[in-house]
Image (cartoon, helix red, strand yellow):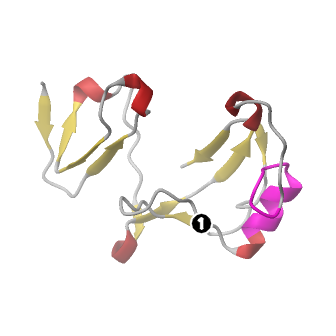
């Protein structure tokens, strides 16, 4: 395993499904080059306490939600939860963009029908 030590604070989530047979992983302090392809794009930490970085947009099925336009949206990474949380205004905006939530149900025949949610950092 080729690992490159990074002196500045760095962490990475490598998330997989149980069906893949490959375990998910959380690493601190190094880059495991076997876990990604392409270039790394660094994001400045805007909020030290929670490792908050700038969130530029939330895109659902290729369409911008516009929620972060002109606002200082931040996203934090939490390895202690399997949930995503949003402030009420963001939930309302995402629901208007067609993103399903507990109170904004979308009937799906399969997981593929749910759609793609991309967080643009």
Quarter where residue 32 is shown: top left
Nearest the eye: 101 or 76: 101
Nearest the eye: 14 or 83: 83
Q: Residue at x 70, y 28 (%)?
A: 112
Residue 61 appears in the rendering: no
Quarter where residue 81 is shown: bottom left
Q: Is residue 99 within the magenta segment?
A: yes
Query: Badge 1 is on which residue?
Result: 85
Q: Is residue 105 above or below residue 40?
A: below
Q: Is residue 84 above or below residue 4?
A: below
Q: Residue at x 31, y 46 (%)?
A: 12
Name the spot of residue 119 as percent of width and height, x first: 60, 47
Name the spot of residue 13 as percent of width and height, x first: 34, 45
Name the spot of residue 1 as percent of width and height, x first: 12, 24
Task: Give the side of residue 14 with respect to residue 121, left or right.
Answer: left
> Given the current orientation, which residue lies at the most extreme right position?
96
Quarter where residue 61 is shown: top right
Task: Give the mark count.
Answer: 1
SS for callout 1:
loop
Residue 120 appears in the rendering: yes
Residues in magenta, as a range: 90-103
Q: Residue at x 36, y 58 (%)?
A: 79
Task: Give the side of residue 23 with respect to residue 77, left or right.
Answer: left
Q: Is residue 1 above or below residue 9?
A: above
Name the spot of residue 91 as percent of width and height, x first: 75, 65
Q: Is residue 45 above or below residue 119?
A: below
Crowd band around label 1 with a 10 angstrom C-alpha radius: few (<14), some (14–19), many (20+): few
Q: Is residue 87 within the magenta segment?
A: no
């Amino acid at each position: 395993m080729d690992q490159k030590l990074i002196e500045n604070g760095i962490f990475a989530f490598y998330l997989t499904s149980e069906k893949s047979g490959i375990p998910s992983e959380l690493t601190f302090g190094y880059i495991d080059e076997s876990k990604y392809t392409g270039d790394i794009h660094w994001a400045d930490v805007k909020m030290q306490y929670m490792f908050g970085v700038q969130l530029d947009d939330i895109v659902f099925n290729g369409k911008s939600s516009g929620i972060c336009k002109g606002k200082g949206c931040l996203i934090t990474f939490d390895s202690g939860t399997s949930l995503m949380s949003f402030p009420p205004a963001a939930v309302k905006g995402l629901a208007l963009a067609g993103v399903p939530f507990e109170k904004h149900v979308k009937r799906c025949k399969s997981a593929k029908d749910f759609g793609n949610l991309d967080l643009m950092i």
